[in-house]
Image (tube, rainbow, N blue to C red):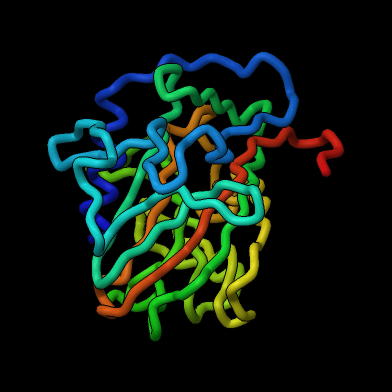
Amino acid sequence: MVYRLMLLLGIGLLMQGLAPRPAPDPQRIRLEDFEAYPVGGYPSRWKFLTSKREFRPLEEFMNEREECRVQAEAGNRFLRCITRGEAQRITLANREDFGMDWDLRTHPRLRWRWRAVHLPAGAREDNRRWNDSGGALYVTFGADWLGRPISIKYTYSSLLPRETVVDFGPLKVIVASSGREGFGDWVTVTRDVVADYRRVFGKKPPSRPLSITIWSDSDNTKDYAVVDFDDFELLPATAAVR
């Protein structure tokens, strides 16, 4: 499952072609807050990447066992991803037609909020047999010489402590939040993606990531996952951002 997703992310996005260009100014960029979508619907900017490396509308691939729909609570809209013994992913490509323009030279930090309502029991990213992540966010940068995507996967882990790093070659897993500290409340995560890349890959990242992908799976544990996502922002390195 891990390497199949890696191949789809890397090869599919590289085939689309990206024209590098810097972001216009070093200000906070609101990437996604899900407010523009109808409650109960799918976030139309995000797509499903197929085995044929095509971006397709989400409604073609969602069902009651694996879905990501916009929900509302206290006047706020957010994305809820649910998997029941399955795996699901939705991708936002770093391209103009997806409404995304991310340059790490001006916006090295990524911020989002998530809330784990339920995480797969016994799941842990450092064990291939139980390797489920109820909630995760992939940042994909390119591909290695075998065509495997080079990605950082930030996870809301069921059992592993925060800042645990798991190495799957071109895929590096970083535990950004942990169920060991409890769950059920919104948690804000801010990651310096450039610093994380240097830490896990030992070198400078490409200036433009290929994509971000929201992920949820519970297929190895055969349990279920319910995780909410909201308020994705790109942040500059030095400006005071509150």
Quarter of image, res 17: top left
Which one is in front, 204 or 91? 91
Q: Residue 12's x, y, as percent?
A: 25, 33
Residue 172 or 83: which is nearer the viewer? 83
- How many marks the image carries: the answer is 0
Q: Does the rendering let one see residue 223?
A: yes
Residue 147 visible? The answer is no
Which quarter of the rendering shows the N terminus? bottom left
Which residue occupies the extreme right position in the image? 240
Residue 5 against residue 186 in the figure, above or below? above
Residue 163 sits in quarter? bottom right
> Residue at left 51%, top 78%?
160
Q: Residue 224 vs residue 4: left or right?
A: right
Identified at 53% across, 53% down, the residue is 229
- Residue positioned 65% across, 48% down in the render: 75
Indicate the position of residue 124 as horizontal and vertical percent values. 41, 77
> Relative to residue 101, is residue 3 depicted above or below?
below
Residue 38, position as x, y percentages in the image:
45, 38
Residue 207 figure quarter: top right
Horizontally, residue 185 falls left or right of residue 11, namely right
Of all residues shown, which one is farthest toward the bottom? 122
User: Residue lying farthest left?
Assistant: 52
Which residue is pictured at 35% across the width and 45% down the height? 90
Residue 6, image x, y percentages: 29, 49
Query: Which of the two residues, 185 or 234, is positioned nearer the viewer here?
Result: 185
